Every structure is written in C-alpha cells, then in structure tokens.
Image: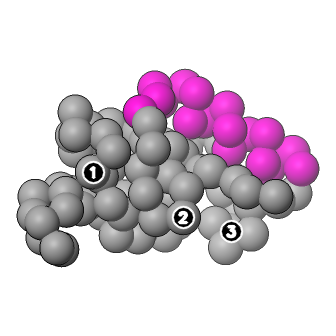
C-alpha cells in the first residue's frame, strides 16, 4: 500500500539538485528534503502532499490537519511521533 503524507514547505531552493526545484518540508516533528518539481506554484508556507520524496499536489492547512487526525485515530503516525492534530502541521 502506498501512502502520501501532507507537510508544510519551510524553505525552497530552486535548482539545488540536478536542476530540480527542491525544498525542506516539515511533517509534524521531522523535516525532509523534498522535490517540488511537480508543484512549481508551491511556495514557503504552503502545504503539499508528499509521496516517496516528491510533492505531488498542494492542499490547504485544514485538509492537512484532517489527514493527521485520521492517522492519529488509526494509531499510525509512525516516525511522526505523537502528533497533536490541533498543532500546526
């Protein structure tokens, strides 16, 4: 099963790796470097859906929170830790 997770873009570096648009994306308690090539309109502060290291679409903050709420209810937040869905993603 494949799973995509929402995260918040905290920084963007155009052309940083192999001329691909890359950025740092926060997922609750962790931050990862993610390819932003598929969402060229995404900017710092935006929320994106990430799958295997690629941001594949934008979404709003409320939708991102709802996904984390569902994951917390399932008890499946894994390496994200004990994420409080009320906190900013």
- Residue 7 visible in the snapshot: no
Left or right of residue 15, residue 61 in this image: right
Residue 42, x across and y down, in percent:
26, 38
Residue 68, x across and y down, in percent:
68, 44
Q: Residue furthest front?
A: 18
Question: What secondary structure is marked by label 1?
Answer: loop
Q: Earlier in the sequence, mark 1 or mark 3?
A: 1
Residue that appears at 26% across and 60% down: 23
Q: Are marks 3 and 2 in contact (CB under 8 Å)?
A: no
Dividing the image into 4 quarters, which one contains the N terminus?
bottom right
Disc sitting over residue 84 in the figure: none
Give the CA separation, mark 3 to mark 2: 19 Å
Give the CA separation, mark 2 to mark 1: 13 Å
Disc sitting over residue 37 in the figure: 1
Magenta-drawn stretch contains 70: yes
Circle 3 residue: 81
In the image, the segment drawn in magenta is 58-74
Using a 10 Å C-alpha cutoff, classify the residue at mark 2 as few (fewer than 14 neighbours), some (14 to 19) or many (20 or more): few
Question: What secondary structure is marked by label 2?
Answer: loop
Residue that appears at 89% across and 50% down: 74
Question: What secondary structure is marked by label 3?
Answer: loop
Using a 10 Å C-alpha cutoff, classify the residue at mark 1 as few (fewer than 14 neighbours), some (14 to 19) or many (20 or more): some
Circle 2 residue: 52
């Amino acid at each position: 099963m494949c799973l995509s997770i929402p995260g918040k873009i905290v920084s963007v570096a155009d052309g940083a790796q192999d001329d691909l648009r890359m950025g740092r994306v926060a997922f609750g308690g962790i931050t990862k470097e993610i390819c932003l090539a598929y969402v060229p309109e995404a900017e710092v502060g935006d929320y994106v859906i990430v799958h295997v290291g690629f941001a594949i679409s934008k979404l709003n903050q409320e939708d991102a929170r709802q996904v984390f709420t569902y994951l917390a209810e399932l008890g499946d937040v894994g390496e994200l830790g004990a994420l409080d869905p009320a906190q900013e993603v």
